Amino acid sequence: MTYICNVCGYIYDENEGYSAGGIAPGTKWEDLPDGFSCPLCGADKDQFSKQ
């Protein structure tokens, strides 16, 4: 599943994770820390939409 930042368009792909942020491949959206923010613009997790 992928999620897109509604502010800047960054796409979080659960299959890829976010290695620079310490998030392993396969990490589900709901398992991301509550403090997760967009690595490009800093938008909060609630500013993302499921694609």
Image (cartoon, grey):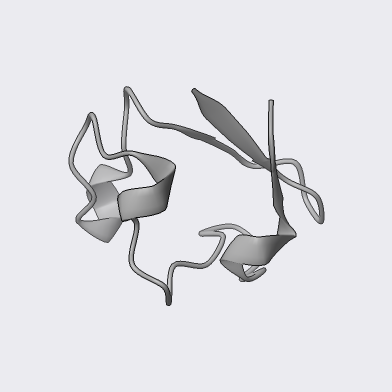
Q: Position of residue 15 (x, y in %)?
A: 32, 22
User: For the view shown, which residue lies furthest in the bottom direction?
Assistant: 35
Q: Which residue: 27% across, 52% down?
A: 20
Residue drawn at x 52%, y 67% is 37
Q: Residue 30 location in percent, x, y?
A: 40, 50
For residue 45, above or below residue 51: below
Q: Quadrant of residue 46?
A: bottom right
Vertical side of 48 occupied by 15: above or below: above
Q: Residue at x 61, y 71 (%)?
A: 42
Residue drawn where x is 67% and y is 68% of the image: 43
**How many numbered marks does the figure carry?**
0
Q: Position of residue 47 (x, y in %)?
A: 72, 60
48 vs 27, left or right, is right
Q: Position of residue 39 (x, y in %)?
A: 51, 59
Residue 15 position (above or below residue 20): above
Quadrant in the rendering for residue 11: top right
Is 2 drawn above or below residue 35 in the view shown?
above
**In the orientation shown, which residue stands out farthest toward the right?**
7
Q: Is residue 3 left or right of residue 34?
A: right
Q: 6 left or right of 30?
A: right
Residues 8 and 26: in front is: 26
Question: Among all residues in the image, which is located at the extreme front?
Answer: 30
Q: Which of the image's four quarters has the C terminus?
A: top right
Which image quadrant for residue 38? Answer: bottom right
